[in-house]
Image: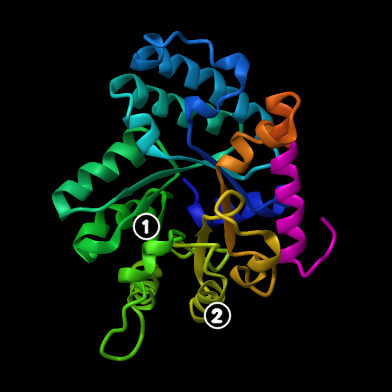
């Protein structure tokens, strides 16, 4: 399999898009015509998984050709137990059949043997193209994912500077050299990714860098030019395209941006057909990000 970074950035250029759609299915936010379960059925994981399937298939149909990837958030699937996990595996396959790369938002991390099981579960068995990884356990906890990036064309995005407000409590703490913790993790990402650099010049070992911290994101881009960024926080968390120009390199590439609720539930603000609303929201995001990345150029 080709290097993940190459596959992702080729898709970015081909579709003129930096859009990643987060798959965070929340039944309470579904369009009215899909919220047909009785109160008893709404507590049944099998019935909910069936509703999730209808909704997510509709989203995949709507954003294919606009988004470059989807990012299923494992928590929403795991909350349904076995039916939800089966649905997750099914959505991985269906998204890929539609030409979308799949980034499993699992945020896994553990000691080496357990990390190996996590990597096998998501990258080998479920077949995701990439996975998000928590670096707290250090190199041995990340190595099973790194090996698949070096040898099997998979990717990983290491949590570096996350989009949530509480991230500063740990990630912004100063180390002995004065650098914040997140910068130290970014340096580790450079080291970890050295063996997985593709022809594009980027490594398949990327970093999660929140859109809600534009100044830190821009500084990280300048300091780590060969690291792919996965940028959450667009849309519902408040970040917009105008403040994200700093996450892209001088060629307008090197980053993809994730939006979940703003696209999935666009019908709540736009009205009309829910699939059309999701498609229009994704297309507006595509155009805005492309213009921001290319300095206001043609969208």
Q: In front of the other: label 1 or label 2?
A: 2
> Is residue 242 toward the left or the right of residue 129 in the image?
right
Q: Residue 222: give its label.
A: 2
> Is residue 22 toward the left or the right of residue 128 in the image?
right
Does the magenta portion include 169?
A: no
Q: Within 10 Å of the Cα at label 1, are there few (<14), some (14-19), or many (20+) other Cα atoms?
A: many
**Vertical placement of residue 224 versus 145, above or below:** below
Residue 235 place in picture, x, y as percent: 61, 51
Q: Nearer the viewer, residue 76 or 150?
A: 76
Q: Residue furthest bottom?
A: 177
> Is residue 3 toward the left or the right of residue 194 in the image?
right
Determine whether label 1 and label 2 are within 8 Å by CB.
Answer: no
Q: Nearer the viewer, residue 166 or 277?
A: 166
Residue 102 place in picture, x, y as percent: 49, 41
Q: Residue at x 42, y 40 (%)?
A: 73
Q: Quadrant of residue 79?
A: top left
Residues rendered magenta in the picture: 280-299
Does the magenta portion include 297?
A: yes
Residue 294 place in picture, x, y as percent: 75, 66
Q: Residue 270: give its label.
A: none
Q: Residue at x 24, y 63 (%)?
A: 136
SS under mark 1 = helix
Q: Residue furthest right?
A: 298
**Vertical placement of residue 93 versus 135, above or below:** above
Q: Nearer the viewer, residue 31 or 58?
A: 31
Q: Residue furthest front?
A: 39
**Vertical placement of residue 25 versus 114, above or below:** above
> Is residue 279 toward the left or the right of residue 237 in the image?
right
Q: Residue 150: give its label.
A: 1
């Amino acid at each position: 399999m080709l290097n993940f970074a190459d596959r992702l950035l080729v898709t970015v250029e081909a579709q003129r898009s930096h859009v990643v759609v987060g798959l965070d299915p929340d039944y309470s936010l579904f369009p009215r015509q899909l919220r047909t379960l009785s109160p008893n059925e709404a507590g049944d994981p099998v019935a909910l998984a069936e509703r999730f399937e209808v909704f997510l298939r509709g989203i995949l149909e709507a954003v294919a050709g606009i988004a470059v990837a989807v990012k299923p958030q494992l928590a929403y699937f795991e909350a349904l137990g076995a039916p939800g996990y089966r649905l997750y595996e099914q959505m991985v396959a269906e998204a890929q059949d539609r030409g979308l790369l799949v980034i499993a938002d699992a945020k896994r991390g553990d000691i080496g043997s357990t990390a190996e099981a996590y990597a096998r579960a998501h990258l080998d068995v479920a077949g995701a193209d990439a996975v998000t990884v928590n670096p707290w356990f250090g190199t041995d906890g990340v190595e099973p994912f790194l090996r698949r990036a070096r040898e099997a064309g998979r990717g990983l995005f290491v949590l570096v500077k996350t989009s949530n407000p509480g991230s500063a409590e740990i990630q912004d703490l100063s180390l002995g050299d004065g650098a914040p913790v997140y910068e130290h993790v970014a340096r580790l990402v450079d080291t970890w990714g050295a063996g997985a650099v593709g022809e594009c010049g980027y490594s398949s070992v990327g970093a999660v860098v929140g859109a809600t911290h534009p100044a830190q994101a821009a500084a990280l881009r300048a300091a780590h030019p060969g690291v792919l960024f996965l940028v959450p926080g667009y849309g519902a968390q408040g970040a917009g395209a105008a403040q994200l120009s700093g996450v892209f390199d001088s060629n307008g590439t090197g980053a993809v941006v994730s939006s979940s609720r703003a696209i999935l539930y666009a019908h709540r603000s736009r009205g009309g057909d829910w699939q059309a609303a999701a498609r229009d929201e994704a297309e507006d995001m595509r155009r805005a990000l492309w213009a921001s990345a290319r300095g206001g150029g043609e969208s």
